[in-house]
Image: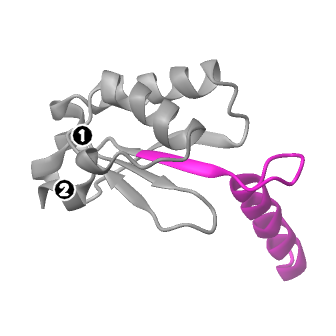
Amino acid sequence: MTREELTAARDAAVQTMTNTPQGKPITRVVVGLATCGIAAGATPVLAAFQEAIAAAGLDSVKALQTGCIGMCQFEPLAEITVPGQEKVTYVNMTPDKAREVVQKHLVGGSVIEEYTVGAVA
């Protein structure tokens, strides 16, 4: 590939990861699924986020997995990044908390402070 082709491929990938096909910015929900997260129950937390996001019809929100977020003692962790806002890190997540976060934070726009790293650290 030429340099121009690589640049075009990179730009297309960034566009896909950051915007919907309609050009709307994507909100990202990232759940840590490294060994410590999996052991603490992060897999059903990610599934709950994905199901609740789909049920709410949030087309511009993606729930994804990542590796280690770096705070094992607070697993399962979920980081929410809304474009133009500060990232919010939720700790000690459960599937029920994930569904509540979707309704109150992603749909309603209100951070659930008592579930955040700032409330426990």
Q: Residue at image x 29%, y 57%?
A: 69
Looking at the image, which residue sits at the far bottom? 3
Q: Please tell me in which quadrant of the rendered image residue 83 appears.
A: bottom right
**Which disc number belongs to residue 2?**
none
Q: CA distance from mark 2 to mark 1?
A: 15 Å
Magenta span of residues = 1-30
The stretch drawn in magenta includes residue 58: no
Q: Please tell me in which quadrant of the rendered image residue 53 appears.
A: top right
Residue at the disc numbered 2: 119
Q: Which of the marked residues, 2 or 1, is nearer the chain's N terminus?
A: 1
Q: Residue at image x 53%, y 23%?
A: 52
**Residue 67, image x and y in percent?**
34, 51
The image quadrant where one finds the N terminus is: bottom right
Q: Residue at image x 32%, y 22%?
A: 96
Instruction: Give the left or right position of residue 109, taking residue 68 as reference.
Output: right
Characterize the local packing of mark 1: few (<14), some (14-19) or many (20 or more) Cα atoms within 10 angstroms.
many
Residue at the disc numbered 1: 76
Characterize the local packing of mark 2: few (<14), some (14-19) or many (20 or more) Cα atoms within 10 angstroms.
few
Which of 13/115 is in front? 115
* Image vertical order of residue 59 relative to residue 121, above or below: above
Which of 114/82 is in front? 114
Helix, strand or loop under label 2: helix
The image quadrant where one finds the C terminus is: bottom left
Instruction: Give the left or right position of residue 22, taking residue 98 as reference.
Output: right
Q: Identify residue type, mark 1.
A: Pro
**Residue 99, image x and y in percent?**
42, 25
Image label count: 2
